[in-house]
Amino acid sequence: MSRRRRPRISPARTLAAGAAALGVLTLTACGSDSGTAGDGGADGALEVTASFYPMEFLAERIGGEHVSVTTLTKPGVEPHDLDLSPKETARLTEADVIVYLKGLQPAVDEAIAQSGVQHIVEATSFTSLEAHGTDEDHAHDDEHADDDEHADDDHADDDHDHDHDHDHADDGHGHDHGAEDPHIWLDPVKYAEVAQGVGTALAEADPDNAADYEANTEALIAELTTLDEEFTTGLADTETRTFITTHAAFGYLAERYGLHEEAIAGIDPESEPSAARLRELHEVAEQDNVSTVFFETLASDATARTLADDLGLKTGVLDPLEGITDQSAGADYLEVMRANLAALRDALGAS
């Protein structure tokens, strides 16, 4: 059976205060030769490059009319597998600001490190990361961990006990970076923390328009606060708290709202589950009264559909929001997240 984690639910009223407290900006100064940040393109707009859709959404909503945003991950492309062409890598050096999320796209991480751009905004620096995934993920990580007292005591005994303070980036659980879950944008509270950081970054890069960036940031955080409240209320009373997904993208969301995610694959959507893992999922589905197996829009649904057929369960879409396409259940982050909430309420038997 998979390890169970005690859910950690933060009150919605703490969102705005928590986001504001994380307004300290981490910028990587690399001695750019591409011009002074804030000069912008030919139309005067600040040239912002985003690594994939969740970062693009923040840059566009916060930057407004003052930015021109391009994304490295085109619609319909699974971001975990993105490779950059030499032309795309070279174009990256022309950005005034880069907004990305470390650990999700190795090719992007490498290209950004070599870009020489002055203003680089890394999303995970504004919030805390945790380890999620399947037992198979953790077993693989443990094979590469040092067999020391720290790993033995903290990792084995307290790995999934989250009854501690929200700010626990350095709490001593001892996960290497490969074990950390990058899907922070699927938790509206964490996403708001990142939004605060991006807003501060844009103001640093373009101080003439800092007041507008601040106002846009506050407006977006208010929308994310409302979204968090909708999830809290909408998932408060359900027949079951367990849902099955294609890959372990919804760990932060599950912890935020007291749910339990069981993933077919791990953090990597292309990983193949073992026979033992599939047997575990059969047991979980029966014991926890699971009604639905969720698949995604950008990853293969073959294993999810096979599992659902074997168990006589329904299938549904739970979108990890790694990109917006014509098949998405909404035009932007907020619309798709509300579609995810409706899908979860139906699958969990919410009243």
Image: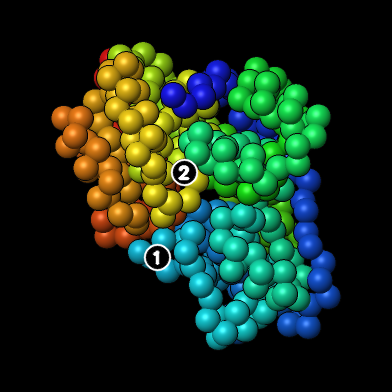
Please tell me which residue is depicted at 52% across the width and 81% down the height of the picture: 85
Query: In front: mark 1 or mark 2?
Result: 2
The residues bearing labels 1 and 2 have C-alpha atoms spaced at a distance of: 19 Å
**Residue 242 is at least partly visible in this image:** yes
Residue 58, x across and y down, in percent: 55, 54
Q: Which residue is mark 1?
A: 77
Which mark is drawn over residue 266? 2
Is residue 212 shown to the viewer in this render?
Answer: no
Residue at image point 61% right, 25% down? 160
Position of 100 relative to 321 (above/below): below
**Residue 150 sits in quarter:** top right
How far across and down, in percent of the image, does residue 299 sit?
A: 34, 54
Q: Is residue 246 left or right of residue 253?
A: left
For the residue pair 210 and 185, the one nearer the viewer reads as 185
Residue 340 placement (x, y as % from top left): 34, 38
Q: Are marks 1 and 2 in contact (CB under 8 Å)?
A: no
Residue 105 left/right relative to 35:
left
Asked which secondary structure carries label 2, the reply is: loop
| Identity, as a three-letter code, of the amino acid under mark 2 | Gly
Q: Nearer the viewer, residue 11 or 309?
A: 309
Q: Which residue is at 20% across, 30% downward?
A: 311
Total residue callouts? 2
Query: Residue 262 lies in what quarter of the image?
Result: top left
Name the amino acid, label 1.
Val
